[in-house]
């Protein structure tokens, strides 16, 4: 190499470094492109279906590639923005302003800060993996193209929501997210139950959205601005003046919070979330793990500088979060549907985030939002693989393929799915060093410092979480296949449904060799007096005949394709390592404190740093280890109880006959049985909240509608029709009289004369 070539090579390297540096410094200028990147795919599909429908449908699976590609470009931009946020400060730039009049104008733009950056990474990473997974999951569905149009538009809406710079812009994308969720939940709209689920989600969210709109208008009336930068400045001035406690301000803040309650499925507007599982499983992972339900948490985190000046609202937020996390955990205890169980788990974990925001623990709430999103997305996609493996055995009805009563022993047939599902379960249970351990432990610590009441509820719920999550795993993968039950139907009165997962009497006609949780008499809380499975039965597990489809159908559960397994493995990596961003590194003492280098603290810095973070957050190792021991102990205890009652360990205890002898000799047996029945009934019937809503609101509204219809037809229309008929008759008579006939005139003359004579002579 001569000197000229050497210098030329150096010049090229310098030019590349300058270009990269320029791109890194000015990436924020093009941040407005991120929400628009998925749109070309939607437009191309639309034009293709209009101009060349046959070719577009025949080459439908090709459309998955540009969807993933464009969202990957959005992810690259998002990562770059996050790096800038770690090394710099918040960035804001608006695009253009629309002046309505001299006193009012709307600014449409974007706000890039640490909160936006982390949400962009979360949405794009989970969205890419869900798109890849969906290509395999929806490959044989007739609505493949329609599904990708909906999901791409949903990604656009969510990206636009988190980058919005004002409340009006957020509300616009907020409604688009709701519309897309309505379309995706009711994707299989020919199913009556799916159509009912999307309607339920739509109506419930409209309640919250109406409150959100009123709150936005109220704050515009109070502050005269809808821009976050202006609202934060006003809120920053409220704090030195001991806050603003006016009734109007509190009411407007409550209405804003109502929008987050509906979107994030908080009590009492949580009823739509379990029913939303009727949509395709990838949608459950995308909407109900990382994006849509996280929108409510994002809104509260964005507006926390406003809420923190109102102690009453903050207390109310923490109370709603506490009720939600406990209610979600109790309702998940007896669910049979694997996706509904995970949905109630999502509800409970969102309650943890809401509690953390209510007590001012901003960083802990967002940290748990990150860790939970990846762990729960892994579990939902894993449940989709389980459903796919069960469908050849039981058919394509959700009542069968998603029913954990019919599962069991799948660890032999789908080992990769089982491994990923196990790690996701342990993460959500709070087992170190997995993702959710770090964030949940911080929330538990901060809740104890804030209020012992909140600490007790949060800690008890942590134990319940470990119990019901490990219950899901054991019922799905442990033991032996229970699909051999005959005469299955979706009705509660069927022979299969009479076998409760919590233990009930075995009716006649049920094969006792496959009983999961029964007793010879009475009701057991868990698995007791379970007969042994015969050896010849165990040998027949691999190949069998089912009554769910065609006769003499021999089927095995099998692992899904690589397209569906790849996202599971990537999400597993996130679940294993994403929690380490919260680990602090000691840089030496500064004054009386400890200098910490924490990616989390740099990444999740609030727009206005006056939130009341707990002083013990990663401050010293002794306090951290003490708190971790208590939280991990609760999780391990829940896992142990679940394994004893649902795992293969039951055979050991049954052989000893110790539990049964103690149980039979207990004089409080009947009382305990009644308590267990009530707990099971509460959990299985969703706390009777859905029944209350159905009877009070649904039936009440229908009754009011029928009454209104009767009043409209019988009274309003009756009066109108009566007046019309009377006018018609009078008109006809006048027309008949005025026709010029002498007989008519003589007739009326004689009538008048008769009347006159009658009154005169009387």
Image (cartoon, rainbow, N blue to C red):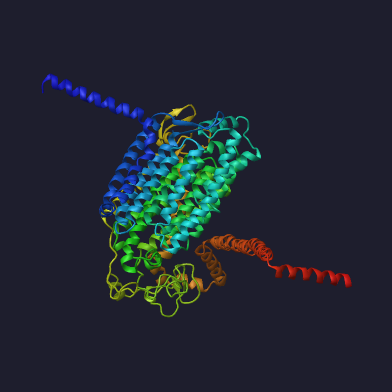
Residue in front for this viewpoint, 132 or 542: 132
In percent of width and height, residue 87 lies at: 39, 29
Drawn side of residue 555 relative to residue 487, left or right: left
The residue depicted at 28 percent of the width and 54 percent of the height is: 57
Drawn side of residue 251 relative to residue 347, left or right: right
The answer to whether residue 15 is seen in the rendering is yes
Q: Is residue 145 above or below residue 691?
A: above
Q: Residue furthest top?
A: 3
In percent of width and height, residue 262 lies at: 52, 50
Q: Residue furthest left?
A: 1
The residue depicted at 41 percent of the width and 41 percent of the height is: 159
Image quadrant in which the C terminus is located: bottom right
Give residue 367's quadrant in the image. Answer: top left
The answer to whether residue 314 is seen in the rendering is no
In percent of width and height, residue 540 lies at: 28, 73
Q: Is residue 57 above or below residue 553?
A: above
In percent of width and height, residue 533 lies at: 35, 73
């Amino acid at each position: 190499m001569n000197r000229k070539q050497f210098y030329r090579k150096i010049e090229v390297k310098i030019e590349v470094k300058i270009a990269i540096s320029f791109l890194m410094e000015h990436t924020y200028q093009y941040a407005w492109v991120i929400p628009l990147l998925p749109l070309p795919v939607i437009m191309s599909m639309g034009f293709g279906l209009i101009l060349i429908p046959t070719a577009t449908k025949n080459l439908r699976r090709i459309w998955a590639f540009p969807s993933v590609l464009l969202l990957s470009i959005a992810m690259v931009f998002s990562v770059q923005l996050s790096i800038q946020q770690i090394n710099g400060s918040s960035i804001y730039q608006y695009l253009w302003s629309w002046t309505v009049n001299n006193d009012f104008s709307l600014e449409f733009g974007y706000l890039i800060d640490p909160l936006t950056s982390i949400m962009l990474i979360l949405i794009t990473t989970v969205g890419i993996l869900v798109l890849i997974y969906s290509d395999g999951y929806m490959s044989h569905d007739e609505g493949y193209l329609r599904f990708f149009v909906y999901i791409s538009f949903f990604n656009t809406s969510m990206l636009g929501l988190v980058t919005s710079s004002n409340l009006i812009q957020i509300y616009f994308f907020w409604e688009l997210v709701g519309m897309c969720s309505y379309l995706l939940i009711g994707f299989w709209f020919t199913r009556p139950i799916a159509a009912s689920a999307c309607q339920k989600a739509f109506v419930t969210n409209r309640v919250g959205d109406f409150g959100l709109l009123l709150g936005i208008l109220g704050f515009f009336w109070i502050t005269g601005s809808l821009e976050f930068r202006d609202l934060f400045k006003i809120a920053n001035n409220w704090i030195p003046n001991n806050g603003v406690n006016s009734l109007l301000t509190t009411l407007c803040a409550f209405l804003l919070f109502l929008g987050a309650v509906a979107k994030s499925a908080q009590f009492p507007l949580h009823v739509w979330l379990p029913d939303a599982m009727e949509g395709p499983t990838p949608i459950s992972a995308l909407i109900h793990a990382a994006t849509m339900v996280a929108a409510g948490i994002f809104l509260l985190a964005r507006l926390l500088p406003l809420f923190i000046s109102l102690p009453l609202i903050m207390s109310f937020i923490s109370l709603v979060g506490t009720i939600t996390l406990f209610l979600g955990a109790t309702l998940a205890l007896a669910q049979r549907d694997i996706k509904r169980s995970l949905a109630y788990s999502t509800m409970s974990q969102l309650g943890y985030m809401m509690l953390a925001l209510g007590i001012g623990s901003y960083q802990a709430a967002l940290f748990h939002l990150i860790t939970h999103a990846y762990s729960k997305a892994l579990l939902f996609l894993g449940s989709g693989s389980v459903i796919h493996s069960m469908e050849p055995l039981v058919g394509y009805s959700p009542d069968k393929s998603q029913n954990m009563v019919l599962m069991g022993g799948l660890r032999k047939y789908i080992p990769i799915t089982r491994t990923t599902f196990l790690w996701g379960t342990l993460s959500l249970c709070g087992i170190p060093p997995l993702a959710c351990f770090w964030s949940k432990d911080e929330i538990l610590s901060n809740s104890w410092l804030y209020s012992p009441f909140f600490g007790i509820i949060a800690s008890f719920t942590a134990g319940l979480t470990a119990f019901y999550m490990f219950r899901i795993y054991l019922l799905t993968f442990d033991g032996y296949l229970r699909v051999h039950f005959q005469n299955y139907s979706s009705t509660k009165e069927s022979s299969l449904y009479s076998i409760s997962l919590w233990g009930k009497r075995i009716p006649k006609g049920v094969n006792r060799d496959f009983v999961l949780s029964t007793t010879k008499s009475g009701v057991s809380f868990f698995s007791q007096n379970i007969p042994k499975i015969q050896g010849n039965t165990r040998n027949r597990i691999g190949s069998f005949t089912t009554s769910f489809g065609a006769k003499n159908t021999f089927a095995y559960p099998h692992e899904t394709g690589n397209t569906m397994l790849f996202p599971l493995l990537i999400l597993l990596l996130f679940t294993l390592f994403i929690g380490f961003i919260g680990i602090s590194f000691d840089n030496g003492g500064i004054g009386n404190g400890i200098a910490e280098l924490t990616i989390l603290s740099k990444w999740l810095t609030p727009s206005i740093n006056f939130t009341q973070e707990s002083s013990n957050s990663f401050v010293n190792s002794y306090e951290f280890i003490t708190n971790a021991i208590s939280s991990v102990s609760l999780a391990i205890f829940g896992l142990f109880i679940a394994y004893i009652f649902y795992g293969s360990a039951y055979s050991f205890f049954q052989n000893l006959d110790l539990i049964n002898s103690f149980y039979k000799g207990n004089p409080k047996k009947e009382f305990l049985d009644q308590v267990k029945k009530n707990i099971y009934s509460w959990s299985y019937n969703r706390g009777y909240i859905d029944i209350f809503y159905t009877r009070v609101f649904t039936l009440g509204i229908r009754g009011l509608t029928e009454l209104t219809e009767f009043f409209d037809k019988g009274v309003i229309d009756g009066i109108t029709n009566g007046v019309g008929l009377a006018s018609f008759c009078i008109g006809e008579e006048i027309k008949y009289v005025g026709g010029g006939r002498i007989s008519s005139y003589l007739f009326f003359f004689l009538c008048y004369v008769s009347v006159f004579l009658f009154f005169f002579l009387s």
